[in-house]
Image (tube, grey):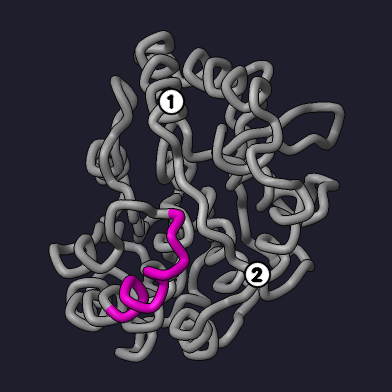
Amino acid sequence: MAHSTQSLSRALVLGGGGVTGIAWEVGVLAGLSSRGIDWSKAASVIGTSAGSFVGTAVASGYDLERLFAAQLVPDENEVAVTASESTMAAWWEALAEGGDDPRKVGVAMGRIAKANPEPVPAATRRRVVASRLVTTDWPAGLKVTAIDADTGKLHVFDQHSGVPLIHAVSASGAVPGVWPIEHFLGCSWVDGGMVSTTNARQAVGHDRIVILAPMPDGYGQIPGAAEDARTLSEQAEVCLIAPDEQSIEAIGPNPYDPQRREAAAQAGRAQGEALAGEVSTLW
């Protein structure tokens, strides 16, 4: 029996991708919104790393045009960071060690973070996080992913988890070797995107799913966004949006470079506007 449009459950999945991923996602969402896509229909907004910041804005009903405009001007609170060659080599070793077991990969990534717990000062990171958040109140429907650095288990935080939003998003974006490890609830936490850039499978159970994946590729033997989308499409209608050629060029080689925010946002917006017809059919 066909579902009515009103009874359909929708989920918006926002993946990780650094500061440029934030800008690109904001651009895509604003472009689609300007063409009539209503993101308030999402029953769940699932954010990982960069997506946790954007997801906070979407789930709280924040003005996407205002958020888009903010990507076009420098933010003095942002700092340029990068993953060193040694850090990236450690990531690949962790992926090889964990193979196709996300929890083993998570444990290995946790060890990397614990070996270098504060690659930039924690106070600097707090300023960055605070500047990116449009609210510190948990919006209903928002889910934020992070990995327990000791067990490797993916955890999904929401308004009922008893954790301040700023702690959850800080943990979700705590890239090992790039940003400081987070500590709360008696645990240590690292970036939720280290075993899946979108964690799109957390959207299981929804009827219609839109996935934004600034970094769509899989890591080692861990499936990428396209594989997750195919799995989800067995029981739902799914639209996966990854950067097109123009967006890839705009984002550049370092996702942690705030100088690329404007270009990434503009390219994302153009891509979103171009995809409006396809997305509106699903959403």
Amino acid on which disc 1 is placed? Ser
Residue name at image x 38 percent, y 85 percent: 33
Looking at this view, name the residue that lies furthest to the left. 245
Residue name at image x 62 percent, y 59 percent: 142
Figure quadrant of residue 118: top right
259 is within the stretch colored magenta = yes
Residue 113: which numbered mark, if any?
A: none
Magenta span: 256-266
Residue at image mark 1? 86
Looking at this view, name the residue that lies furthest to the top. 97
Q: Which of these two is toward me, 128 or 33?
A: 128
Image height of 142 relative to 181, above or below: below
Residue at image mark 2? 77
Residue 248, percent from left and from top? 22, 60
The CA span between labels 2 and 1 is 26 Å
Query: In the figure, is residue 142 to the left or right of 228?
Result: right
Image height of 47 relative to 87, above or below: below
Figure quadrant of residue 268: bottom left
Query: In the figure, is residue 80 to the left or right of 126?
Result: left
Which mark is first along the chain, 1 or 2?
2
209 is within the stretch colored magenta = no
Residue 41, percent from left and from top? 49, 74
Secondary structure beneath dot 1 equals helix
- Asked if one can make out residue 204 in the rendered structure from this viewpoint, the answer is no
Quadrant of the image containing the N terminus: bottom left
Image height of 265 relative to 109, above or below: below
Figure quadrant of residue 94: top left
